[in-house]
């Protein structure tokens, strides 16, 4: 899957379908980027992108940052996001990752906490891209 194929879902779900919003990460095309998606038939319904990163927590661990986790509106709450998250974690473990982290939207924190992620106390902030509340989250994979 080419990263550009993720842009429509990213824009629709994460940027209120605003055509002027950026949904590309400069690391998308790097060989070390990992993109994991879920399909219903041929339709992409979940996407996640992962990039090697030096995290703000446990910087000594081999870490990937999650960005642009998006589940299409009509399938949210059906477990597709959880399946993609678990699949990505398996792929990243195989690549030697010991930890994953993200700036999670506060509205999605319950999803991540249920999947075993933890919040970083005092990391609450407004995303510069969306002006929505976010919190730094992480999960130890090792």
Image: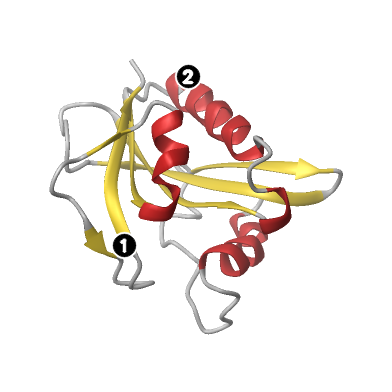
Check residue 133 in the rendering and tell me which mark sits there, or answer none: 1
Query: Residue 134: image x %, image y %?
Result: 31, 57
Give the x, y percent position of residue 101: 32, 39
Q: Do the residues labelled 1 and 2 touch (CB within 8 Å)?
A: no
Task: Identify the residue at horizontal 30%, vertical 66% (top origin).
Answer: 127
Q: Looking at the rendering, in which quadrant would you find the C terminus?
A: top left
Residue occupied by mark 2: 94
Residue at the outermost top position: 142
Please state which of residues 29 and 120 is positioned toward the viewer in this rendering.
120
Query: Of callouts 1 and 2, which one flags the residue occurring earlier in the amino acid sequence?
Result: 2
Give the residue drawn at x 28%, y 28%. Answer: 62
Q: Give the number of the disc on residue 60.
A: none
Q: Please give left or right for residue 53 compared with residue 111 in the image.
A: left
Q: Is 98 on the left or on the right of 66, as rendered?
A: left
59 relative to 123, above or below? above
Q: Which of marks 1 and 2 is in front?
A: 1
Mark-to-mark CA distance, 1 and 2: 32 Å
Q: Position of residue 54 (x, y in %)?
A: 22, 41
| Mark 2 residue crowding within 10 angstroms, few (<14) / some (14–19) / many (20+) | few
**Colouring convention used in this rendered image of the protein:** secondary structure
Element type at mark 1: strand
Number of numbered callouts drawn: 2
Q: In this view, does 101 lie above or below 11?
A: above
Q: Measuring 84% from the left and 48% from the top, which residue is drawn there?
A: 42
Residue nearest the observer in this picture, 4 or 112: 112
Vertical comparison of 41 with 27: above or below: above
């Amino acid at each position: 899957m080419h990263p550009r194929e993720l842009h429509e879902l990213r824009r629709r779900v994460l940027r209120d379908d605003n055509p002027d919003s950026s949904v590309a990460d400069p690391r998308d095309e790097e060989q070390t980027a990992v993109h994991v998606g879920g399909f219903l038939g041929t339709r992409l319904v979940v996407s996640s992108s992962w990039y090697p990163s030096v995290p703000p927590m446990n910087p000594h661990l081999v870490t990937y940052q999650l960005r642009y986790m998006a589940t299409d509106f009509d399938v949210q709450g059906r477990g597709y996001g959880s399946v993609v998250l678990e699949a990505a974690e398996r792929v990243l473990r195989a690549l030697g990752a010991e930890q994953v982290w993200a700036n999670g939207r506060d509205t999605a924190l319950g999803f991540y906490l249920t999947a075993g992620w933890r919040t970083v106390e005092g990391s609450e902030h407004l995303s510069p891209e969306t002006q929505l509340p976010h919190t730094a989250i992480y999960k130890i994979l090792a």
